[in-house]
Image (tube, coloured by chain):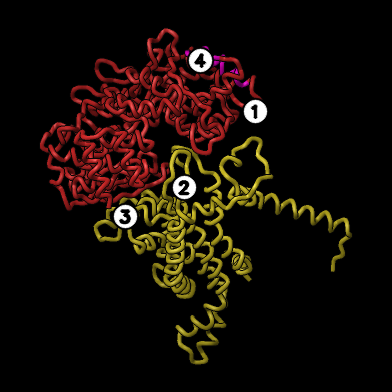
Chain colours: A yellow, B red
Amino acid sequence: MHHHSPIERVLRGIALLIVVLFFMFPIFWILLMSLQTNETILRSPPSIVFEPTLSNYAAIIAGRLDSNVASMGIDFMSNLMNSVILSVGSVALALVLGVPAAYAFARHKFRGSEDIAFTLLSFRFAPPLLVLLPLTLYFQQIGLADTYFGLIWVYQLICLPLILWIVRGYFEDISPDVEHAYRIAGHSWFSTFRRISLPLAAPGIAAAALLAFIFAWNNFIFALVLASADKQPVTVGALAFVTASGIQYGQIAAAVVLSITPTLALALYAQRYLVEGLSLGAVKG
Amino acid sequence: MYEKENDLINAYMRGQMSRRSLLRGLASMGVTAGTAAVLVNGAATRAMAADFDWKAHSGKSIKLLLNKHPYTDAMLANLDNFKELTGMEVTYDIFPEDVYFDKVTASLSSQSSEYDAFMTGAYMTWTYGPAGWIVDHNEWINDPSKTNPNYNWSDMLEGVRKSCAWNGRPGGALGSDDAKQWCIPWGYEQNNLAYNSEMLEKAGVGVPSNIDQLVEIAAKLQAAHEGVYGIGVRGSRSWATIHPGFLSGYANFGQKDLNVADDGKLSAAMNTEVSKDYHAKWVKMIQDSGAADWSTHTWYQVGTDLGAGKSAMIYDADILGYFMNGGDNAMAGKLAYAPFSANPEAAAPTPNIWIWSLAMSKFSKDLDATWYFMQWASGPEHGLFGATQMDFVNPVRQSVWDDAGFRKRLSDSYPGYVEMHDVSAPGAKIHFTPQPLFFDLTTEWAATLQKMVAKEVPVDEGLDQLAESVNAQLKDAGLG
C-alpha cells in the first residue's frame, strides 16, 4: 500500500481541481449565461456578479421569444421532444437489429459475413448529403418523407454500424466454452444467447447504446433535409435564437442547458458501464 | 366576433368617416391599435376583392418554406386576411436562418413538391434559375387573368425589381429586356451608415461623408472612447463580407467585380489602380479602427456590437442598424442613420442591396394558386400593413415609401432613416455581375481581404493574385 505525504495529497488535490475546472468551465459559463438577460451578458467587461433570472427558461418553456423588435413563437420544447423520440427510437431499433447481428458475426462464420459487416460499417464513410438527396426522392415516392418512422430508419445509418461493430467485439471476447457448457446441458441456441451471452456482454451493449444515443442526439442534417419544421430536433431548434434582429445569447444558453441535460444525466448514470464496457474489449486475454 | 367593429371600418372604407373617428370609435369598443390595424387591413382586402376573382382557387392548399425573420412575422400576422379573401389554406415551415438555405437547396435539388413557394435572396436565384428549379414569374405578372388589377408591378422600386431579373447568361445585365423575373422582391436592405450619435457628439466629430473621412473619424472615435472600436464591418471568410458596405463603397468609385467583353467572356476587374487605392483605405480603416476579431465578424457581431455600445458606427445593412435601435439593446434610442458616398466626387450613394424575395418552386403542383399568395404577399396592401404595423422594413414599393404615416413612424424613432433611403434609393441595386461562380469568387475576395488586413500580403500584390486566380477559375468554368 502506498502512503502519500500530506503535501503530495494537497498538490494532487489542487491539480485535480484545476483539471476539473478546466473541463467544466464552458458548461459552468453556459449555466451562468442562461441565468442572465442579454443585456448583462453583453456588457463589457463580462462579470460573474449579476442578478439571476429564470426568464430565459420561462421564455423557452412558454415558447415565446422576445427579440429586439418583436415577440415571436419558438417551439423549442417540441424540438426537445423530437430529439427524445428520434434518439430513443433509433437506438432501440438499432439494438433489436444490431445485437443479434453482432452475435451472428462473432460466433458464426458464414460465407460473406465479413463483407456484410464491412458494408454496414461503410455507411459511416459516405458524406450524409450524398445519401440524403436521393433518399428524399425515394421517401417521397413511398410516403416515408416527413415521418418519424422514416427518420428513425435513416438514423440507423448512425446507430446500427456503431452498435454492430462495438458489440461484436464483446461477443468475440466471451469464451465460447461457457456457451458450449450451457448448450450441453440441453438448452437451445436462443436460450443460450439470451441467458449467457447477452448478460455477459451487457456492459458492452450499454456502452454502445449510450454512444449511439449521443451520436443520434447530436445529429443535425438528417431531419433538416428529410423532415418539415415540426419534426426538427434540438440541434436545429437551438438555431432559432439566432435571428436577423439579434442573437438571444441567454436563451441559447438556456436551450443548451436543457438539451444537454438528458445526455448528461444518462452518461452520469451509465458512467461505470461506459468505462467498464469500453475497456473490456480493449485487451484480448 | 368584431361585427360592430367591422361596420365601423366599412364606413371608414366607404369614406363616411375620418381615420381619427374610426380609431376613437374602435378604442371605445376596447379594440387595441394592433387589432384595429388587422381589421382595417381586412376591410382593405375585401375592397380588393371587388375587381378580381380572388376565390378562383378557393378550397386549395399551398405550403410555404420560410426563414425566421421579421418579414415572416409580418406576413403571418396578416395571413388570416388572405385566407378569408381567397378561401385558400396556407401551411408553412419556418427554419432558422443559419440552416435555411441548406433546407431550400436540399428541397429544390431533390425536386420535392412539398413546398409551393419559398423565401430567397436574389443572389441564390443565379443558381436556382439556370438549374431549372424556379419559374419565370413574368408569365404570371403579365397575365391579367391571373394577376389582380391593383397589383401595380411598376410600383416596385426599379433598382430592386430589376435586380431580381436576369436573362441567365453569365455577365448578362440585371433587368435587361430579355431577363426572366426569377423572384419577386419582398423586403430589402441598403448598405449605409448607422452611428451612435452620442459617441459622435462626445468625440466632437461629424458624420463622415466619404471614405477618407470614414477612415479618419473612425480612428478619432476609437481614440475618444475607452473600450470602443471605431467602425463595424463584416470580415468572415464569406461572400457576405464583400456584398454590404465594402461593395457599396467600391461601386461608388465606378468599380466593377468583373469585365464583360463583347463576346460575353468574363474577366477580373478588381486590380485597377482606383480599386487598389480603395482597398488600401478599407484595409487601413480595419487595421486602425476595426474590431480586434474582425476576421470572424458576420452580420450578428457587427449588429450586436453596435447595439451593445462596443462600436461607434457600422457601414452595413440599414435594417441592421434599425433593429439595434430598439428592444433590450443598451444603445437603443441612441442610433442615427446617414447615406454614405465613399467617393467624394460621386453625386449620390450607390448601395449594393440584399433583397429578401419570394419565388415559386418549379415543382409546385399548382403554380396558379400559389401565385395568388405571391401577389397578395408582395402586393401594396400587405406592404403597407407590414411597414406600418410590423417590422416589414425596408418596403420594396414606392407607394409605401410615399405613405405619410409610414414616413412619420420611421422618422420619429429612427432619425435620418427616411432621408437616407430617399437619397440612396435611386442608386440602390445589385452591383455584382451575375454569374454562376458568384459565391466562390466573392469568398476568395473576402479571404484576400483577410490576408491584407493581417499584413500577410500587400494590397497591390494581393489584388493582382486575386485577379489572376479569378481569371483562371472563369476560364476553367468556360466563362472567361
Asked whether B214 falls inside the magenta stretch, the response is yes
Please say if A108 is above or below B368: below
Q: Which residue is mark 4?
A: B208
Residue at the top extreme?
A: B345
Secondary structure mostly seen in the magenta stretch: helix
Mark closest to the chain's N terminus, 4 or 1: 4
Q: Nearer the viewer, mark 4 or mark 3?
A: 4
- Residue at image coords 51%, 66%: A209
Q: Nearer the viewer, residue B100 or B315?
A: B315
Q: Is any atom of residue B4 visible in this view?
A: yes
Residue A150 position, x and y percent, is 34, 61
Question: In the rendered image, which residue does mark 2 sit on?
Answer: A65
Quadrant of the rendering where the C terminus of chain B is positioned? top left
Q: Chain of mark 2?
A: A
Name the residue tied to disc 3.
Answer: A135
Query: Which disc number belongs to residue A183?
Result: none
Across and down, in percent, residue A256 comes to: 54, 52
Q: Nearer the viewer, mark 3 or mark 1?
A: 1
